[in-house]
Image (cartoon, rainbow, N blue to C red):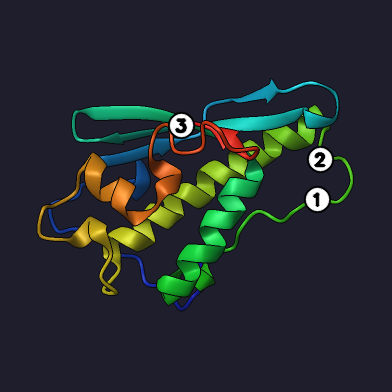
């Protein structure tokens, strides 16, 4: 949920309706996958990003989402007002909870991009080159395909 101190920003050219699903940038978390075996078994969430005519998919663990949020809110204070889906100490492997978290992460990313598209704090999404796959990747390595391939926290 966006707290009251973040104003909604809508481009004059943007049509009315849900801002995160219209316009040049769309993000979805359509599914999750169980990866690894035994002690290394974990869930990864599929993140589909579309900017203009470019679409790519990355798979990330919840811990990578949390890590991205923590690092970017230091650089962009306006992100501190975004509520991040909380960590669960118990039941974090329950299918119902995993699917619920998937929905919360999708909603978080949509609000995240809405805030970053409106950010006056030097967001690459508002840079001179305009909105592009490259600009999204410059915002955070989280959105770059293949970045975490060899990591223990997710794949690209």
Q: Which of 109 and 23 is in front in this view?
A: 109
The circle drawn on residue 88 is 1
Q: Going by the image, does 147 lie left or right of 130?
A: right
Quarter of the rendering occupied by the N terminus = bottom right
**Residue drawn at point x = 19 percent, y = 48 percent:** 131
Q: What is the tally of numbered marks visible in this picture?
A: 3
The circle drawn on residue 39 is none
Residues packed near mark 2 inside 10 Å, few (<14), some (14 to 19) or many (20 plus): some
Residue 9 appearing in the image: yes
Residue 23 appearing in the image: no
Q: Which of marks 3 and 2 is nearer the N terminus?
A: 3
Relative to 60, does residue 32 appear above or below in the rendering?
A: above
Q: Going by the image, does 138 lie left or right of 110?
A: left
Q: Nearer the viewer, residue 12 or 154?
A: 154
- Res 86 → quadrant: bottom right
Which residue position holds label 2?
A: 92
The circle drawn on residue 58 is 3
Using the numbered discs, state the Cα–Cα distance from disc 3 to disc 2 in whole angstroms: 21 Å
Residues packed near mark 1 inside 10 Å, few (<14), some (14 to 19) or many (20 plus): few
**Residue drawn at point x = 59 percent, y = 63 percent:** 83
Residue lying furthest right in this view?
90
Q: Which of 85 and 154 is in front in this view?
A: 154
Q: Earlier in the sequence, mark 1 or mark 3?
A: 3
């Amino acid at each position: 949920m966006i707290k009251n101190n973040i104003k909604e920003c809508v481009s004059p050219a943007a049509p009315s309706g849900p801002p995160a699903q219209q316009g040049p940038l769309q993000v979805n978390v359509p599914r999750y996958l169980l990866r690894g075996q035994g002690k290394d078994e974990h869930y990864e969430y599929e993140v589909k990003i579309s900017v203009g005519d470019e679409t790519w998919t990355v798979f990330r663990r919840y811990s990578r989402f949390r890590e991205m949020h923590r690092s970017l809110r230091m650089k962009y204070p306006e992100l501190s007002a975004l509520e991040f889906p909380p960590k669960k100490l118990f039941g974090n492997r329950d299918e119902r909870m995993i699917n619920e978290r998937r929905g919360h992460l999708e909603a978080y990313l949509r609000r995240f991009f809405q805030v970053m598209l409106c950010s006056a704090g030097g967001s690459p999404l508002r840079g001179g080159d305009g909105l592009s796959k490259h600009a999204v990747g410059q915002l955070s390595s989280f959105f770059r395909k293949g970045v975490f391939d060899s990591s223990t926290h997710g794949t690209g």
